Image (tube, helix red, strand yellow):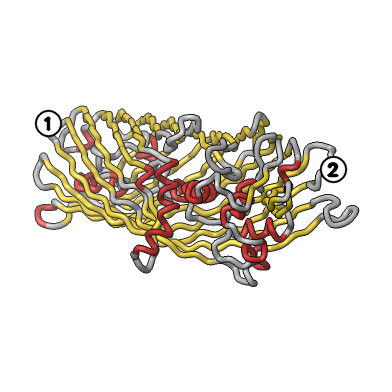
Amino acid sequence: MPLVCYALTYHHMKTRSLILSLLITAACANAQVPEEALRLSWLNQMGTARNQAIGGAMGSLGGDATASLVNPAGLAFFKTSDFVISPTLQMGKMKTNFRGTEREDPNLQKFAWGTSGFVFGGQGYRGKNSYSISFTQKASFNRSFRYNGNNNYSSFGEPLGDEFAASRLTIDQALNSPDISLTTKMALYTYLVDTAMVNGIPQVIVRSENSSMLHQEYSAEMKGGITEITLGFGHESNKKWMIGGSIGIPIVMVDRNSYFRESDATSALNDFSFLSYREKYRLSGVGVNLRAGAIYRPKEYIRLGLAIHTPDMFTLKETFESGFAADLENLFAPNSGYDSVSSTTVNNGIIPVARFNVNTPARMILSGSYVFREVANVKKQRAFVTADIEYLNYKWSNFSDPKENTSDTRAYYKPFNDAIKASYKGAFNFRLGAEVKFNIVMARLGFASYGSPYKDAELRSNKTFLSGGLGYRDKGIFLDLTYTYRMNRDVHFPYRVSAPRANTYAGLKDNGGQLMLSLGFKI
């Protein structure tokens, strides 16, 4: 890997393209990046065990508490009141591949909640209205992964040198500037990023780029998730039309501890031995969303559904603390090149706190169901097949200021939103399920596929779910048991370099199972 020097005049790169690259640098601790917006929006459908057994499809079927999360018009099928609780056990292991080096982490088990709560059916004049209140763990972020490998192309310090060079500040000015990221300040403090005279011209240098081969490793442990409280309403206008709406209050909590280390993989003395970066990060907040839908039955055995979801509109708070260390071999004196610093040191003893808004993409869901022997007495229904097609565009996510919307605040968040538009695209999600009823016992199968959100076709990412389950209903009690096997692929960038250079990333495979039990009672 050749040494890259950056002239302080820095005419060869536009500042804006540099900023867009730096926004998604893992080293620059900041939730206002495409990855965090994606984390809040690339979610698979969660629900009750019955819903999960049929792939999560619920856009036209109804008769399940999950309807308030997909198409609340489906609540209108309730003519009695239900209580349901859905404990869940999730299992699996993470496999990573970074620059040809594969790794498999141990099995991880975690507890979660499917849709649980109350549905009050048969309310109002002629029993045409239904209401629901439920909570659902829409996403669980409990996971850990790590990867490592050799890299002769780029360095963690490269985008930090880019940021300093583009600023056109001196080292002292940069260390005291609010416009320079804390990670770059820590790299300057430890002399990983520095200035030097090259052929009589002052240059910005990054000492980790002195090495022709670097060994890199990354690890992260995450906890938390998104839990939503949902209030739903369904109304049967007549035998053919049902309408409904719901309001959701998603609550976010994410804790992440991450570590990155980069070391010289050669035996040369080149003023670089290693650098390391640690980060303790928390993201928390609350949001709101609205859902509206309709179900039309042109024939008694056919159900067609349409639902529209507004964005999840979050108000979030982030805090983080980090530490940076660099060993520059003999830079200061024989065997004296090590230095370290914390983020609070370069930030005048203050722990950074940021508040901002995030809007996830809106969604549209089209659905159809075919019910065999569709009659008013649901006990006589024998089977159904159902399918959902969902569309959302991940580049519709955006950041904004939580207090005011002015030209200055819009200008501040514009690079972040431009980065989202440059990174993501629209995608279709498909959910398919079927059930066969044997008197009081039901057998179910399901399939779901969630398309890649990434604009770059080389970032191979998708989510696939295969499910099956059994149900029991008799004398006012229902019990559903479902097993879902997931095959998820995603990518992770340890840092981002400036365009037009290519970025290196790790491939992630998250395969495993989910066992969900829903227990319910007629009330």
Split into 4 quadrants, where in the image is the C terminus?
Answer: bottom left
Q: Image check: 129 left or right of 229? A: left
Indicate whether 518 appears above or below 346: above
Q: Position of residue 409 (x, y in %)?
A: 39, 63
Q: Nearer the viewer, residue 420 or 518?
A: 420
Question: Closer to us: mark 1 or mark 2?
Answer: 2
| Residue 502 vertical position relative to residue 331 in the rendered view, above or below | above
The tag earlier along the polypeptide, 1 or 2, is 2
Which of the numbered marks, if any, corresponds to residue 299?
1
| Amino acid found under the numbered disc labelled 1 | Lys
Looking at the image, the residue that sits furthest to the bottom is 349
Residue 10 falls left or right of residue 295: right
Q: Is residue 125 left or right of residue 18?
A: left
Residue at 44% over, 47% down: 419
Quarter in which the N terminus is drawn: top right
Residue 178 position in % (x across, y down): 56, 66
Can residue 378 be spotted in the picture? yes
What kind of element bears circle 2?
loop
Q: Residue 148's image quarter?
A: top right
> Secondary structure under badge 1?
loop
Residue type, label 2: Leu
Give whichever of 140, 519 is nearer the camera: 140
Image quadrant where residue 42 sits: top left
Task: Give percent across and percent down for residue 158.
Answer: 64, 46
Which residue is painted at 22% across and 30% down in the image?
371
Structural crowding at the residue carrying mark 1, measured as other residues with C-alpha within 10 Å and reported as few (<14), some (14–19) or many (≥20): few
Q: From the image, tell me which residue sits under label 2.
A: 269
Q: Position of residue 320 (x, y in %)?
A: 58, 61
Specify the farthest residue to the front.
200
Disc 2 crowd rating (10 Å Cα; few below 14, some 14-19, many 20+) is: few
Label pair 1/2, CB-CB below 8 angstroms: no
Q: Which mark is residue 339?
A: none
